[in-house]
Amino acid sequence: MPCPRIVIQRQADFDPLLAKLKGREDPGQDVEARVRDILAYVQAQGDEALADFNRRFDCPSFAASMLRVPEAEIQAAESLVIGSDLAIIREAAANIRAFHERQKQNSWWTTGPDGVILGQMVRPVDSVGLYVPGGQGGETPLISSLLMNAIPAQVAGVERIAAISPPRADGTLNPYILAAAAILGIREVYRVGSAWGIAALAFGTRTIPSVDVIAGPGNMYVTTAKRLLVGQVGIDMIAGPSEIVILADKSAPAAWLAADMLSQAEHDPLAASILVTDSPAQADAVLAALRDQLERLPRAEIARRSLAQWGAVVVAPDMDEALAAVNRLAPEHLELAVEDGWGILGRIRHAGAIFLGAGCPEPVGDYFAGPNHVLPTMGNARFSSALSVETFIKKSSLIAAPPSYARRHGAKIARLARLEGLEAHARSVECRNE
């Protein structure tokens, strides 16, 4: 059996699986200690530390002078990419931009009868650093990660956007990453990855100026570095391994559901793929389809390990219990492969992204449709949202009160201050009424 088949009669039966999934990625003290050492080394030695790490882990002949990719090389990359692929990247970028344009927020203010003006000013951060994983040896570049992170920052109005990605063994970056950067108009790209790249963006080096916000997916070293640097910089979110939950009734083709589970399982041995259904026959059919499709999958070993450890086919007694299980999972990706998806949609409380209908698989959103694929994982959709334009803006409150406001309300303000033991606060209001 490719993954466990779990039958639940009540939610308590679901607790063991939920507890197991919550502990799916714990970097442990060893990883955190190593990352702290990396951060300290980069903060002290700057470019030399980055070059040292690149030589050890990516490109044996790397020199600090190679960190920044020349702008001419970024522009030339478009000529190295198949024209039809460039067209697909441009179309995906246009879809993503159109979706995020609707997230823009405006400054506002309101006036009161007592002359006070209250409002909120919305401004973009000054600079953003984007982490773009290079994939397997730089040969499977995560183009979509660059699009999904850069475009919301551009829509927000960020003036400076820098991208980093680990170099290949020859010291270059994959031309698809550079071509995507060229299409987006990003001119600042650096050859550096992992936790040391995150450190460079946070602290700044001779070659890489520091940024205000860091965004982009990565392994546990990247994630741990971002977590440790919160406060030094802003970050998008603390994300764990990818996950998909599929809520299905008997109407959805089992082969489709199995393919969708495998679309996440092939990511990473820590990825979680879970089917929740009220149909025992559907559960059996999906398990059979998983066995069949695994045999023909290029990344079969990764997917097999993921399914065996973190996958599950859950059979609930009815759709009410199935929905309760889905909401407790609060998944990163949720597919509603049911006949009445719109009818069920209002009962979904927690999910990073929702894919409605068996004909709408998760990769539609991952790559092309427009909504962001940087999503909360590990149940964090209970309180967190997808990366958006809001990730790259900040809001300032505005208060403009005429002298008459302090005269009218000064005694009340002073009383509140004194209740908190802050006499100077009280006097700062009262002195305006003397």
Image: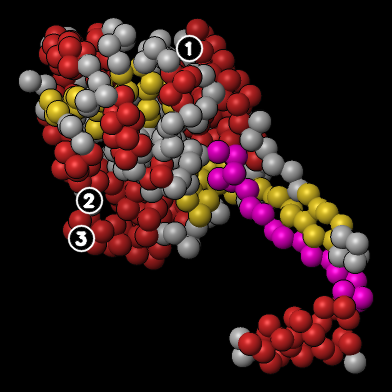
Residue in the picture at 50% in, 57% down: 233
Measure the C-alpha gap from mark 2 to mark 1. Answer: 38 Å
Kind of element beneath mark 3:
helix
Sequence-wise, the earlier of marks 1 and 3 is 3
Eye-nearest disc, 2 or 1: 2
Q: Which residues are magenta?
A: 388-405
The residue that appears at 37% across and 15% down in the rendered structure is 338
- In the image, residue 40 sits, relative to residue 330, either above or below, namely below
Residue picked out by circle 3: 29
Q: Nearer the viewer, mark 3 or mark 2?
A: 2
Q: Amino acid at mark 1?
A: Asp
* The quarter of the displayed image where residue 240 is located: top left
Q: Position of residue 343 (x, y in %)?
A: 47, 20
Q: Residues within 10 Å of mark 1 (few under 14, many from 20)?
A: few
Mark 1 secondary-structure assignment: helix
Look at mark 2 in the image and give the residue it sits on. Answer: 26
Badge number at residue 85: 1
Placement of 286 over or under 406, stated as above or below: above
Asked if residue 249 can be seen in this view, the reply is yes
Magenta highlight on residue 222? no
Based on the picture, tell me whether residue 397 belongs to the magenta stretch. yes
